[in-house]
Amino acid sequence: MTEETIDKNELNTTPPKKIPLKLIIIAISVLVLIGGGIFGAMKFGLIGKKSIARHEGEEGNNPENAAVHGKIVGVDAFIVNLADSEANRYLKATAQFELKSPEFEKKIKESDPLIRDTILALLSSKTMDQIRDIKGKIKLRQEIIARVNEILGTQAITQVYFTEFIIQ
């Protein structure tokens, strides 16, 4: 009987099932895509240490290392015709000034008409090609800082932030 039992057990055992080749190829493809996505995200700084530092400030979330910003003063929106000769183009821009010291806020309010006139003249002298890309906007910021500081007679403005910049 023992021989018969062994023979029955041998007959009942079936060879292990093979995993279909298509399933293996799909699994490997998915792993390669996930790995490529993670590599791409790390390469472009979307994940990883650089991304975390960027969200916390370059030096991390330490208050001692945080960038010190001056007082921010808003300026009313500017709507001007651009100097494009081939088409009528308009610019609507709203800016915020970062001040070196809060004491300059009163001086800016007192000089508001002069500052607005200067910025209006500057903006209306620009063409769309001069200000549509980031380099043009950076140059425009620098020009505004220089002209406003010239009006104020001191280096009161440290940065200009555009909160609205629409060209039509």
Image (tube, rainbow, N blue to C red):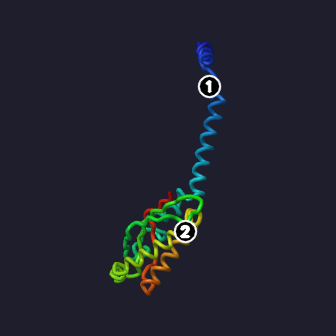
Looking at the picture, tell me which residue is in the foreground, 142 or 147. Answer: 147
Q: Is residue 131 left or right of residue 77?
A: right
Q: Nearer the viewer, mark 1 or mark 2?
A: 2
N-term mark: 1 or 2: 1
Q: Nearer the viewer, residue 70 or 118?
A: 118
Three-letter amino acid code at the position of disc 2: Lys
Q: How many marks?
A: 2
Name the residue that disc number 2 marks: 126
Residue at 55% x, 59% y: name it.
45
Q: Residue at x 58, y 66 (%)?
A: 130
Crowd band around label 1 with a 10 angstrom C-alpha radius: few (<14), some (14–19), many (20+): few
**Whole-Å distance between the Cαs marked 1 and 2?**
74 Å
Please give the residue where the numbered disc 1 appears in the rendered image: 17
Q: Secondary structure at mark 1?
A: loop
Q: Amino acid at mark 1?
A: Lys
Q: Is residue 99 visible?
A: yes
Whether residue 133 is visible to the viewer of this picture, yes or no, is no
**Position of residue 155 measured from the top left corner of the image (x, y, whole percent):** 45, 84
Q: Where residue 7 sits in the image (x, y, percent)?
A: 63, 15
Frontmost residue, 103 versus 45? 103
